[in-house]
Image (cartoon, grey):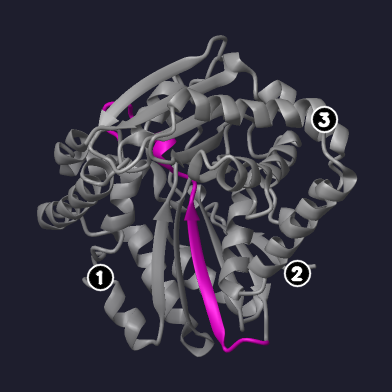
Amino acid sequence: MIQFERFTLANGLKVVVHEDKSTPMVVVNVIYDVGAKDEHPEKTGFAHLFEHLMFGGSVNIPEYDEPLQVAGGENNAFTTTDLTNYYCQLPAENIETAFWLESDRMLSLAFSEKSLEVQRKVVCEEFKENYINKPYGDAWNKMMALAFTTHPYRWMTIGKELKHIEDATLEDVKSFFAKHYNPSNAILVVAGNTTVEKVKELSEKWFGSIPSGEKYVRNLPQEPKQTAPRVQEVKANVPLDAMYKCWHIYPRLDKRYYIVDLITEILSGGGSSRLYQALVKEKQLFSNIECYHHGTTDAGLITIEGKLVKGVNMKDAEAAINEELVKLQKEGITDKELQKVKNKTESMMCFEDMSVMSRATSLAMYELLGDANLINTELEKYQSVTAEELVAETKVIFDENNCNTLYYYAVN
C-alpha cells in the first residue's frame, strides 16, 4: 500500500505528497493536463514543442538546467497525446531549488523569437530523423490517420506534419501556454524524503501566488464506431516487409481496459506467448511480432505488428495472425495461462513501484485520471478478470469491421 496525502491550493493547483524516509532523494513532478489531442488540427505538435520550450529558460532563470545541476539534481520530461510531464530528482536538502524552478516557469516562461527558433529547429530535426528518414518512421503517422477519422488521436504527438511546427508563431505559442500551463490545469507530486508540512509550506510559498488561469474544459470530437475494415499499402526503402494491424478498444478508465491489457500479454508477453511461439518459432513467418495497446486516456487502439521473414507472402502472414486470434476466440484460455499473465502483471507493477521516481510518476498519472489511489487498487481489477470475460472480449475487439491494416512493403 503506497501512502500519500492530497491538498489543493487556492489557485487550483492539486498537490500529492508521498513520504519515503528510506531515500536521501526527493522527486518533484509537475503534470499538465494537456497533450497532442488538445491541439488545433491545423496547428499540431505544440504540446511536444512546449516540452522543449519549457527548458528554454524563464524570465528570472535564463538556464533551467544549471541551478538544478548545481543542486545535484537531474530532470527530464515527456509528452503524450494526453498529457505533458516534467520531473526532476535531487537531494532532499535541496528540495526548494526544484520548487523555485518549476514555479518560475509556470508563472513566467521566457518567450522570445530566439528561444522559439532554437527549439523549433530541435523539434524539426527530431521529426526528420525519427519520422521521415528512419525506416518505418512514417508508419504511425499513416496508421493514426487511417484508424481515426474524427478524434484528435488521428495525429501523432510530434505533430501531423512538419509545416505546423515550421509555421508556429510567437503569438501561437503564447496563447497555447496561457490556455494550458497554469495551476488549475496542473498537478504537483512530491515524493521522497520530505514531509507533508514541508511541501505545504513550499507549495504556498512558490506556487500559491501564481494566478489560477482558466480551467481548460475539454470538448473533443468523439470517434464514431468503425463499421468496415480499412486498409492501406505503403512501399518504401526498408529492409523487410512489415504489417501493422490495429483495432479500436476502450478508454483508460473502462473496466474492459484491464481485460485488453491481459490479452496483449497472452498474445505477446515474451518468449512463451502465443504469437511468438506460433509465428516466430514454429512457422517462422515473422522475425519479430508483438501485441500491445497504447494506454491512452480516451478510447485507443490495440496493435499487432511484426516484421516478416524475407520471402514470406504478406497474405500468408496475415492469415496466420488471424488463425491465432480465431484459436483464442474458439478454444479460450486455461485458468493456468490466465494466472500466469496476472502474476507477470503483478510483478511488473511491484517492480515499477520500487523507485521513488516511478511512484511519483504513477501518482501524478493516476491523479490526472481522477484518483491517485488507483495506484493501490488497480491490481485488484486485473485479478478479478475471468477467462470467460477475456475470451468474450476477443470476439468483440478482433472483428474484421473494427480492423485497420497497414501493409508496409520493402522496395529495394
Which quadrant holds the N terminus?
bottom right
Spot occupied by residue 46 in the image (x, y as percentages of width and height)? 30, 42
Q: Distance between the residues labelled 2 and 1?
A: 35 Å
Crowd band around label 3 with a 10 angstrom C-alpha radius: few (<14), some (14–19), many (20+) = few
Spot occupied by residue 391 in the image (x, y as percentages of width and height)? 79, 31
Is any part of residue 248 visible from this angle? no
| Amino acid type at image mark 3 | Glu
Residues 215 and 146: in front is 146
Q: Distance between the residues labelled 3 and 2?
A: 42 Å
Residues 88 and 248: in front is 248
Which quadrant holds the C terminus?
top left
2 and 1 marks in contact (CB < 8 Å) = no
Sequence-wise first label, 2 or 1: 2
Crowd band around label 2 with a 10 angstrom C-alpha radius: few (<14), some (14–19), many (20+) = few
Residue interval drawn in magenta: 22-44
Q: Which numbered disc covers residue 3? A: 2
Sequence-wise first label, 3 or 1: 1
Q: Along the horizontal axis of the image, is 208 left or right of 339?
A: left
Is any part of residue 71 visible from this angle? yes
Q: Is residue 140 magenta?
A: no
| Amino acid type at image mark 2 | Gln
Q: In which quarter of the image is residue 232?
A: top left
In the depicted structure, whether residue 25 falls above or below residue 33: below
Residue position marked by numbered label 3 in the rendering: 331
Q: What element carries label 2?
A: loop
Spot occupied by residue 20 in the image (x, y as percentages of width and height)? 67, 80
